[in-house]
Structure formats: C-alpha cells, structure tokens
Image (cartoon, helix red, strand yellow):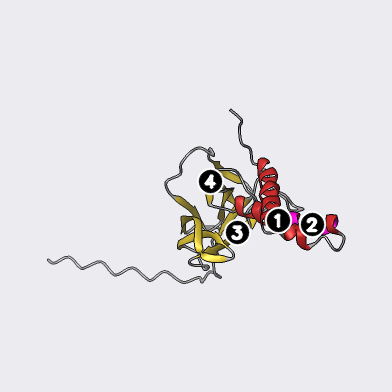
Amino acid sequence: MATYTREDDLVIALQEATKSMTLSGRFDQVECYNSDTEAANRTTAIADIYVAWLRKTKSVRLTLVALEEQTGEVVATFSEEGAVPVSSMDTSQQLRYIISAADDRGFAVDATLAVTVSDPAVASATVLEAASAEGTASGKDELLVVALAPGSTLVTVADPADPTVIFGSDSVDVVAGGVAAVVLSTPVVEEQPAPAPEPTPEP
C-alpha cells in the first residue's frame, strides 16, 4: 500500500487544477492567444489555491521546554513529551515554548500566528521564527513569554486572519522575585535615652 506524504500535495493539487481547467472549458478559452503559456499559468495558479487549502493550519501545540532568566541563563528544561501542569515564573524570568503547527491530516505546516496575552501588564509574548535571520536554538518556531509583573495571564495563539479561531493557549502565573538589593538610607546617630532610676526600697 502506497504511503501518502505531504509532498504528494503538489501532485494532487496539480491534477485537480488540470481537471478543473478541463471540465470548465477554460483551456478552450485561451486557445486564441499564447495558449500553452496562458493555460499553464492559470493551472498553476489554481494548484496553488489547492495546496494552500490542503496545508491550512488546523492545530497548534505549545510545548514548554525551558524556564530561563531574562539574561538567557537556563533555570530548568523540560522534555518535549513531558507535561508541565503549571506554567509559572518570577518577575526576572521567561518561559520558552516550541510551536508545533499541523494541518487536519497531522502533517507539519509553516504557520503565521497571532499571539496575544490577556493581561499585557503581567507578561509579553513574542513568536521567534526558525527561518528568521536570528534563527532559534531549537531550529523550530518558538514562543517566548517574558514576565513583567506579578499576576496571572492567558497566552493565546490564534489565526491572524480570524482571531476568533484559537489554536492553543496556556495560563501563566508570575510571582514576585527575590530581593535584588537592599538600600540603606543615611544613618541617624542618636543618644540612647537615660535609664529610668531604680525604685527606692521601702524601709
């Protein structure tokens, strides 16, 4: 039995585009002027539409892989297969997720995503693309959530064309960090109060 792969999308899309052009009579419409080139351009344009439809993002998985200091120092790492029940950090830290997007057949897709946080005063969220000039350490698209202030917020990944289509989310708790510094004001020197006189014993 033949195994269907994601690359077969291109063949299927071209076949369906050719059928569409043939059945609709569109090949006949271009016979009078540079028919071969025009027909090929129209067919590939339709094929591109089919490919985009086949590879449309259906689901996105956010996998927490690291808790870091905002300086970049790694505090803890987590297995991609593991489950972390609570995503929490203090105000000096950040959480790093791997983004895994798939179509409705389970094949990985390159997704353009919109990320929002319910309370932007608590944390910020940024998508780091593996294909960008800076790249990512994992070689995959990542989500970086940076703590700003104590509180709770919901990080949501959605379709930028339709924000009501939510692909994934995670609740993040931010707690106050440890004491970073102690500031002492200018000391004031005072005389100690004189001790109270001892009571005179009764005769």
- Tell me the SS state at disc 1: helix
**Disc 2 residue type (three-letter):** Ala
Q: Earlier in the sequence, mark 1 or mark 3?
A: 1
- Tell me the SS state at disc 3: loop
**Disc 1 residue type (three-letter):** Met
- Mark 2 or 4, which is nearer the eye? 2
Q: Earlier in the sequence, mark 1 or mark 4?
A: 1
Q: Pick whichever, 80 or 94, lies toward us.
A: 80
Residue 19 position, x and y percent, is 67, 51
Residue 55 position, x and y percent, is 62, 50
Residue at the far left in the pictured view? 203
Q: In whole angstroms, how far apart are the C-alphas of marks 2 and 4? A: 45 Å
Q: Main secondary structure of the magenta part?
A: helix
Q: Earlier in the sequence, mark 2 or mark 4?
A: 2
- Circle 2 sits on which residue? 39
The quarter in which the N terminus is drawn is: top right
- Mark 1 or 4, which is nearer the eye? 1
